[in-house]
């Protein structure tokens, strides 16, 4: 069946190829300076396994033309663009967790993002061998990237919402039982509150912030006289907030503020950033 004029074309390429059918669209004309002949300027829309699949691809493009160059962006390309926008707004530890999740996706790094389907994402989950908490972070990465891509018309469907990680809920060999600190234990800590490590725990209890939020708190975001500090990097956007400093722990904040010799409020004995790993 002959296709309409200016509709585009689908034909089979020679050789043994996984996607042998090329889908093209004429985007303009130019004159060959040597021969004087008019030549078509064609742009490749994509490649297909069958002619029927190629015709469908061509029909979709004609129905709703999209940026062909943008559609060629790989999973790694989208991650790079997303991370440049995301990482400055979150904590260092959270950024490292996203980077680790991205490393789990090596099998799809070079795949065009728009060509990915649910089975591709699910295969990453099924074969990476990570425990449940890590898989949760991986799924969050998928969700964030699809949201980023769809806002820019780089894909038409969010497959991340269908990724199943619940089947691995019990795969967590490092799971620890977590209990709320009792009032009796808090009283014991106040009895030895001159200990700087104990102070950090009390500062966490009375401010309600995450461990990473306190450890990543810079002195420039602490207002001792006004008794508050600003969390400017957090696991979630809702975590960006102003936190009051209770009277009971104000002297501790003041001591750390005046004695920390680095840009962070909490520092090690060597006056270096007190990282989460060191804290644990």
Image (tube, rainbow, N blue to C red):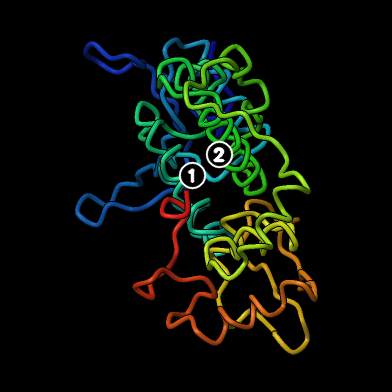
Dividing the picture into quadrants, the one containing residue 229 is bottom right
Q: Is residue 273 above or below residue 209?
A: below
Residue at image point 56% right, 36% down: 137
Residue contact at pointers 2 and 1, CB within 8 angstroms: yes
Q: Look at mark 1 in the image and give the residue it sits on.
A: 98
Nearest to the observer: residue 149 or residue 192: 192
Locate residue 280, reporting x and y percent.
Answer: 47, 48
Residue at image point 66% right, 29% down: 157
* Dot 2 or dot 1, earlier in sequence: 1
Nearest to the observer: residue 110 or residue 122: 122
Determine the secondary structure under disc 1. helix
Quarter of the figure with the N terminus = top right
Quick one: label 2, few (<14), some, or many (20+) residues within 10 Å? Answer: some
Q: Is residue 179 above or below residue 248?
A: above
Locate residue 8, reporting x and y percent.
Answer: 51, 29
Residue at image point 56% right, 56% down: 212
Q: Look at mark 2 in the image and give the residue it sits on.
A: 141
User: In the drawing, does residue 5 fall left or right of residue 186?
Assistant: left
Determine the secondary structure under disc 2. helix
Locate residue 83, reporting x and y percent.
Answer: 49, 53
Quick one: label 1, few (<14), some, or many (20+) residues within 10 Å? Answer: some
């Amino acid at each position: 069946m002959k296709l309409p004029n200016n509709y585009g074309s689908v034909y089979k390429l020679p050789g043994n190829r996984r996607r042998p059918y090329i889908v093209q669209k004429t985007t303009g004309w130019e004159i060959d300076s040597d021969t004087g002949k008019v030549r078509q300027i064609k742009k490749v829309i994509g490649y297909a396994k069958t002619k029927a699949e190629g015709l469908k691809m061509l029909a979709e493009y004609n129905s709703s033309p999209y940026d062909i160059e943008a559609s060629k962006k790989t999973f790694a390309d989208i991650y790079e663009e997303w991370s440049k926008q995301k990482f400055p707004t979150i904590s260092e530890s959270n950024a490292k967790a996203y980077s680790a999740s991205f490393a789990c996706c090596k099998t799809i790094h070079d795949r065009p993002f728009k060509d990915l389907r649910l089975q591709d994402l699910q295969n990453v989950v099924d074969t990476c061998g990570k425990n449940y908490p890590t898989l949760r972070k991986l799924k969050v990465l998928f969700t964030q990237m699809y949201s980023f891509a769809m806002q820019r018309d780089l894909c038409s469907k969010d497959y991340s919402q269908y990724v199943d990680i619940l089947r691995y809920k019990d795969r967590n060999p490092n799971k620890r039982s977590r209990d709320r600190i009792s009032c009796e234990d808090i009283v014991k800590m106040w009895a030895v509150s001159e200990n700087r490590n104990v102070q950090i725990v009390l500062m966490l209890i009375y401010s309600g912030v995450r461990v990473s939020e306190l450890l990543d708190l810079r002195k420039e975001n602490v207002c001792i006289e006004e008794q508050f500090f600003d969390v400017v990097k957090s696991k979630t956007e809702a975590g960006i907030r102003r936190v009051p400093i209770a009277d009971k722990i104000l002297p501790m904040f003041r001591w750390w503020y005046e004695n920390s010799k680095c840009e962070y409020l909490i520092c090690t004995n060597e006056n270096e950033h007190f990282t989460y790993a060191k804290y644990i």
